[in-house]
Amino acid sequence: MQEKDLQQKLRPAMVEGEHSFASVTDSISDITLKKRTPFGWFIGFGIAFMVAQLLMFSVIWLLANGIGVWGNNQPVGWAFDIINFVWWIGIGHAGTLISAILLLLNQKWRTSINRFAEAMTLFAVACAAMFPLLHTGRPWLAAYWLFPYPNTMGLWPQFRSPLIWDVFAVSTYATVSALFWYVGLIPDFATLRDRAKNKYFRFVYAALSWGWRGSARHWHRYEITYLILAGLSTPLVLSVHSIVSFDFSVSQLPGWHATIFPPYFVAGAVFAGFAMVLILCIPLRRWYRMEDFITKTHLVFMSKVMLATGLIVVYGYAMEAFFGWYSAAEYEVFMVKNRVWEGPYWWSYWLLIFCNGLSIQLLWFKRFRESEFWLFTISIIVSVGMWLERFVIIVTSLHRDFLPSSWAMYSPTMIDWSMFIGTIGFFFTLLFLFVRFVPIISIFEVRTLLPEANVHGHHQDFEANVNEVEYTYDRTDPPNE
Amino acid sequence: MAQIFNKSANNIAKISMVLVVVLAGVAGFAFTQISRSSYLTGRYLEKQQPVQFSHKHHVGDDGIDCRYCHTSVETTASAGMPPTQTCMNCHSQIWADSPYLEPVRASFRDNKPIEWERVHDLPEYTYFNHSIHVAKGVGCSTCHGQIDNMPAVYQENTLQMEWCLACHRNPEKFIRPKSEIYNMKWQDGDLDTAERDKLKSDYKIRSREMMTSCSTCHR
């Protein structure tokens, strides 16, 4: 094998096509600054915004009438609200994994997808956080139910309950993710500031970039901050969904009370998150011609992560069934039987196995890994599957209580659906705004991927690089008058 | 290209970072204070009554026992508001022609109760019973203050849940012997800790878990 081929195989180029520092900056920042907003953007934003109105309508309806408008009942007291909460929180996890863990592991390919994966995390957490608040029915009172503060009732939340751990886990997660995203954006905001022609855009980008001049001292501090934030986020990737899983596993309900839950939830979260990243980045790279930065190699890498985490999740399903049988406890055995074939929701379990277990097996084959169409389709199926997983865990465990006299069926109402679909609209509304106003790919980090960023090459190349660097400097950072 | 921001923007940026923290702290502190203020709780605010009945005169000067008017305090949830007939027991004889007391006589004549303004108004979702508190050694003045010094009755305490719980968590700090229940001059320091602990066991006051259980007060 040629040395070049071997290099390509071991360290595939993460930027394709003929690119220099300047052309990278141009092609990414022009989306925000120069190019006319594509007509499709208005259509997409319009649809998403209208769907988001469903959320507003359902929330108002819910607050006016109380949570009786949902299908929740006894014994299924947790239903769509918690299913959707866990689903959204899970989706966010890929963003943190990509930005933090892959950074610490020095995985260069993260740089072209981390920006919008982190944005996805933030928007997903925003959608997720709505559900537990609205689940209380009176969110204006939720302050003292959720947060420990010296209230006039002399009451504190139950610190022994995973629900309060969840409040801390999710709010820490949201804060650190927002910080991480924003700090990563500062140098790029500065680039936009220097290139913006519009007075107002320039003012906003200037305010957001906090006087960034790109001096060596700035970069030095920036690198340290970014690394510290990555260190802070890394445990969060594992802790947040572990704690979400405690909401279930700490209770003593058959179907919830299993030690496999934390790792199985974390793997499921990363699985769902990568599926969502793929769903977003496959059309995005097409529409905005970003194939040079989000390459096929990126898609293949993500599909591999999806396959690996998907297999862990399938192992989780197997272990749940095994635990049920191995426990030899009457209720556990009943739960497994009821969930898998005897109960009225058997179809949801098998649909789940199809979506999360069978569909991903295609990813063993190169042909499917390299096909955008198949990756997109499988990612959609996996997203549905991960939603079904929470449905199966929550509804099938709850609807058959210990006493047959309290058994009941659960079915969602229109408001349940409109609220869930509304959050999807809300999510995409934010995402469309993000794509329009913020560089969707980290400009300065992608520049480090170029071969010319690697300046200890041959002498001749070095000369060329220096010229190139000076050229870009002139273009991007005109000296102040 | 001209600078977008003036040089002062550097200072504004730094100050704003500090200010956000300080303002958040101040807002948090203000919140805890306002939520306990008499503006929201009605504490210490005297109320206009149809007749300015003075507890200071009737209890403090005349020495009438609480139970003379609030007859059901030892037996029922409500301490009981006296009917006009109770007033007329005396006021048919003394101050019988006073114009000040005309609303009382009118009420008696027309057989129409005087509409007193409630001073201590607990929310409907709290279950409160006077008789059990009296039976377990909680004196009137523990909650209502020194009524014998009040020309017009006002709310001595916030009636907020943290105030209820202060006693429900540590009842031994606030109880007194049965004989002193109606003593307006009683101070919590009149008994030492050991005596109050003994009282607590004599009264068979339940455990802290029971006393602070949700359904003890929210039924």
Image (cartoon, coloured by chain):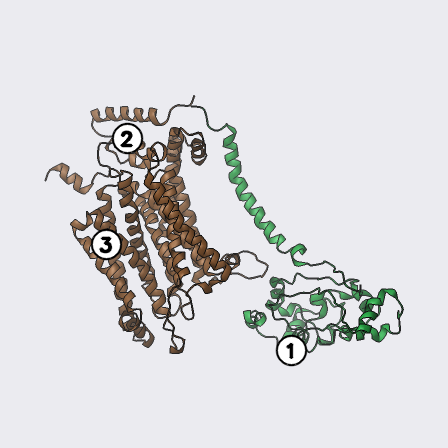
Is B178 situated above or below A69?
A: below
Residue A206 lies, in percent from the top left, at 44, 32
Q: CA distance from mark 1 to mark 3?
A: 69 Å
In the rendered image, the quadrant that contains the C terminus of chain A is top left
In this structure image, what is the colour of chain B?
green
Chain ID, mark 1: B
Q: CA distance from mark 2 to mark 1?
A: 87 Å
Crowding around mark 2 (Cα neighbors within 10 Å: few <14, some 14 to 19, many 20+) is few
Q: Which residue is mark 1?
A: B202
Please report whichever mark, 3 or 2, sits nearer to the chain's N-terminal start.
2
Is B203 situated above or below A3?
A: below
Q: Which tag is nearer the camera, tag 2 or tag 1? A: 2
Labelled disc at residue A307: 3
Residue plotted at (88% across, 69% down): B95
Residue A130 lies, in percent from the top left, at 44, 55
Tell me which chain appears brown. A
Is A316 situated above or below A210?
A: below
Residue A11 lies, in percent from the top left, at 20, 41
Chain ID, mark 3: A
Q: Is residue A124 left or right of residue A347?
A: right
Type of the residue with mark 1: Asp
Labelled disc at residue A406: none
Q: Which tag is nearer the camera, tag 3 or tag 2? A: 2
Marks 2 and 1 in Cβ contact (< 8 Å): no
Crowding around mark 1 (Cα neighbors within 10 Å: few <14, some 14 to 19, many 20+) is few
Q: Which tag is nearer the camera, tag 1 or tag 3? A: 3
Is A354 situated above or below A454?
A: below
- Residue most extreme to the top: A481
Q: Which residue is mark 2?
A: A23
